[in-house]
Image (cartoon, rainbow, N blue to C red):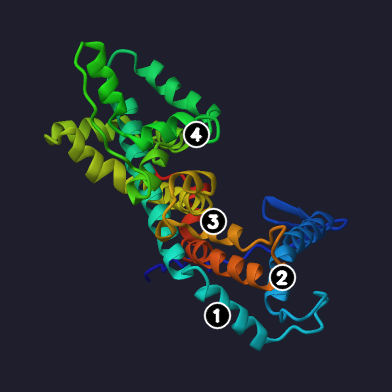
Amino acid sequence: MTAVATVPETRRAPQRRRGGVRSQGMVEHALWFDRLAYVVLVVGTVIICLPIFYAIVVAATPDDVASYDGAGVSLAALAENLSRAWAKESLGRQLFNSMVMAVGITVGKIVISTLSAFAICYFRFPLRTVFFWLIFITLMLPVEVRIVPTFEVAANALSPVNAVLGLIGLEASLEWSLLDSYTGLILPLIASATATFLFRQFYLTVPEELCEAAKIDGAGPMTFFLRVVLPMSTTTIAALSVILFIFGWNQYLWPLLITTDPDMTTIVIGVARTLPTEDADAQWSLTMATAILATLPPVAVVLLLQRWFVKGLVDSEK
């Protein structure tokens, strides 16, 4: 006779209850803690969604209604206000400008941060640690603090060259203005100390054996970066891309200073221009409708990349 070994079917561990505690295997969940977590989640969701709900209610109210108590809310009024907001001040052009600016800032920050973090982690050069901390210290210098010198450089990007030539006795008046241009909107904001720090921390977790194996195979630094390190950073890049896109989309002060041409206005400035002034009547329905249209692109980006965003925050690929 031939002995036949049977493999027992894997069964789910039964749940056991002990004094209001649900136990499953080695993990125990207190029922009161689960209920408290749900209450906190619901309260937080209501707090976050309440301003959005109010904006929709106001945007769906006709202009001739004195109070926004929800009495005159209708889909027809919402469609009319959205149509008016779209037609006023070339809202489509403003959305396009904001999209170009946000995408450019995102791509620029990712490219510069990955390359700078790769150089700091895998290259040995003098003062490497000093350069890293100099980059990290810039976190304490936001755009608002360095806005004046940044604007001066953007007004004439070749002014540093003129200054260097003046030090050696050569007078020059080279000019290259970045005002009212996509380059001026994007270029001064593409450096990111936060992204460089995060990529450096991730690269430190990459096993050194991969680098040694790449050297044995004859791969150069850029080949190792493009074929090994960069593919391993996809989830981190996706998570940072969402954050950086929203950062670029929400910029207000820098576009306000660097653009004077109405064709280069961004959507955030467009929303601010719909706010009532002292000599004008308040049109809150139009303002809220414009704000709703301004929030649609970043919301779409978050919804499309939410899985990668969460995965990049909680996973650590090696």
Does label 1 or label 2 sit earlier along the sequence? 2
The residue that label 1 is drawn on is: 83
Label 1 secondary element: helix
Residue at 67 percent of width and 75 percent of height: 59
Secondary structure at numbered mark 2: helix
Please determine whether, in this image, residue 253 is positioned above or below residue 136. Answer: below
Q: Which mark is residue 119?
A: none
Could you tell me which quadrant the C terminus lies in? top left
Q: Classify mark 4: helix, strand or loop.
A: helix
Task: Give the mark count.
Answer: 4
Left or right of residue 22: residue 84: left
The correct choice, above or below, for 83 with respect to 176 in the image is: below
Q: Residue furthest bottom?
A: 76
Q: Which residue shows up at 33% across the image and 32% down it?
A: 116
* Image position, residue 148 (x, y; %): 48, 31
Which amino acid, by three-letter code, is at mark 3?
A: Ile
Label 3 sits on residue: 269
Other-residue count near label 2 (Cα within 10 Å), few / some / many at <14 / 14–19 / ≥20? few
CA–CA distance between discs 1 and 2? 19 Å
Tell me where residue 263 sits by quadrant: bottom left
